[in-house]
Amino acid sequence: MPRSRANGNFIDKTFSIVANILLRIIPTTSGEKKAFTYYRDGMLAQSEGNYAEALQNYYEATRLEIDPYDRSYILYNIGLIHTSNGEHTKALEYYFRALERNPFLPQAFNNMAVICHYRGEQAILQGDSEIAEAWFDQAAEYWKQAIALTPGNYIEAQNWLKITKRFEFE
């Protein structure tokens, strides 16, 4: 039985029912339907903290999904899992790949900025202020891109940019 049918959460069940109805009424190929099923099962596994299972589903979804926009969200979610697992280099790779297919993902820019900021903080702890500044500058660039896409969001990042004089807002 697919994961989406075994889950007992009301919201997950509702999502699964709506998704199944949409899959029946929207004209899609069998490959697209399979890709969506894997993506949906990946999201459910991810929401339960079953990252290994989520990754398996997402990898299969990327193998089947041909639409670049849809692939961007799958790749973004893979990046989220790698971020959660502390695998920041892999996470950055998947965020980049997501943005190649969909440059309008402010959450990917934000997550990349958070990783760079974290690396800057780690460099400070190691006593390397020059490397830290490079990471902070990169974080600033990513946050600027996220903010440009969604000006009302990322208030903490906007404040950090102002405080560190990396960006002036009008």
Image: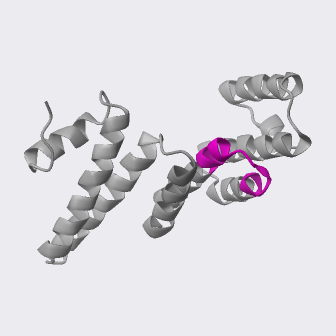
* Above/below status of 142 relative to 130: above
Q: In this view, does 140 lie to the left or right of 104?
A: left
Tally the numbered discs: 0
Is residue 85 visible in the rendered image? The answer is no
* Above/below status of 88 relative to 161: below
Could you say where residue 19 lies in the image, as x and y percent from the top left?
A: 77, 28
Q: In this view, does 114 lie to the left or right of 71?
A: left
Which residue appears at 79% of the width and 46% of the height?
Answer: 35
Query: Is residue 66 shown in magenta?
Result: yes
Q: In this view, does 29 lie to the left or right of 67?
A: right
Is residue 165 visible in the rendered image? The answer is yes
Residue 8 quadrant = top right
Main SS category, magenta section: helix
Could you say where residue 96 lies in the image, as x and y percent from the top left?
A: 49, 58
Q: Relative to the observer, which residue lies in front, 71 or 126?
A: 71
Q: Relative to the observer, which residue lies in front, 123 or 108?
A: 108
Which residue appears at 67% of the width and 53% of the height?
Answer: 54
Which residue appears at 62% of the width and 56% of the height?
Answer: 51
> As drawn, which residue projects farthest toward the bottom?
127
Could you say where residue 52 lies in the image, as x and y percent from the top left?
A: 66, 60
For the record, the magenta segment spans: 60-74
